[in-house]
Amino acid sequence: MEYTAKDYTKLIGTSDFSDKMMNNHFTLYQGYVTNTNKVLGILVQMLKEGKTANPEFAELKRRLGWEFNGMRLHEYYFDNLGGTAPLDANGPLGKKLIENFNSLEEWEKDFRATGAMRGIGWSVLYMDSTNGSLINFWINEHDVSNPAGCIPLLVMDVFEHAYMLDYGLKRADYIEGFFKSIDWKAVEARLA
């Protein structure tokens, strides 16, 4: 199976994100797709050749998580951008957020605080597939801290490449711009 980079050019012109920054981000994402395919191809070949007991195989298996999750988290991120309508508090997602966080304001405060933490990574609203509860998680790097069995609903990239070009060191301003551009219908669709 070979992965193909999705076309996100529809996001060009999104308010609060310059075209240059978006194009740079798309190029970075395409690199994750390319590297995922390369690593998978090499692993298949090593398996065929019986080279699974060597350190290179082990290191590539570990690298696969970085490349694959880098690809997939960027897809979730880009897919939940491009909206202009606010979250419907009476819709399925709004109700579930209120149920889990007591109010939309409390959820948003927690999500923003998670994204504002020092370091590089991701702020992700996950739904636990075992009981349906919603939890905001910090994902340190693509392959670290992803909660097993949880479904990402809202993904915000807080690596510097996602905001430095437009916002410099003002991560809070980027988070504000991100919230203005969320496609809540795409996020809500992930509940299913």
Image (spheres, rainbow, N blue to C red):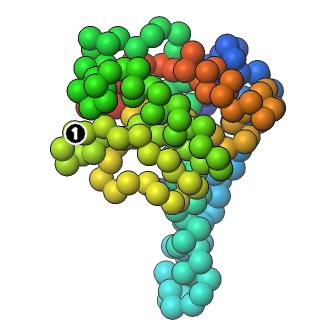
Name the residue nearer the viewer: 98 or 76.
98
From this view, report whether residue 144 is shown above or below residue 44.
Answer: above
Helix, strand or loop at disc 1? loop
Which residue occupies the extreme top position in the image? 85
**Quadrant of the rendered image containing residue 180:** top right
Residue marked by disc 1: 132
From this view, report whether residue 42 is shown above or below residue 71.
Answer: below
Residue 93 in view, yes or no? no
Query: What residue is rendered at 69% in x and 32% in y?
Result: 171
**Quadrant of the rendered image containing residue 74:** top right
Q: Quadrant of the C terminus?
A: top left
Is residue 165 left or right of 3 when viewed as pictured? right
The amino acid marked with disc number 1 is Gly
Instruction: Give percent across and percent down for residue 98.
Output: 28, 23
Instruction: Give percent across and percent down for residue 163.
Output: 72, 33
Residue 89 in view, yes or no? yes
Q: How many marks on residues?
A: 1
Dot 1, crowdedness within 10 Å: few (<14), some or many (≥20)?
Answer: some
Is residue 127 left or right of 49 when viewed as pictured? left
Instruction: Give percent across and percent down for residue 29.
Output: 65, 43
Query: What residue is rendered at 41% in x and 40% in y?
Result: 136
Query: What residue is rendered at 58% in x and 55% in y?
Result: 141
Query: What residue is rendered at 31% in x and 37% in y?
Result: 134
Is residue 102 left or right of 106 when viewed as pictured? left
From this view, report whether residue 108 is shown above or below residue 48.
Answer: above
Instruction: Give percent across and percent down for residue 131.
Output: 18, 44
Which residue occupies the extreme left position in the image? 131
Is residue 167 left or right of 173 when viewed as pictured? right
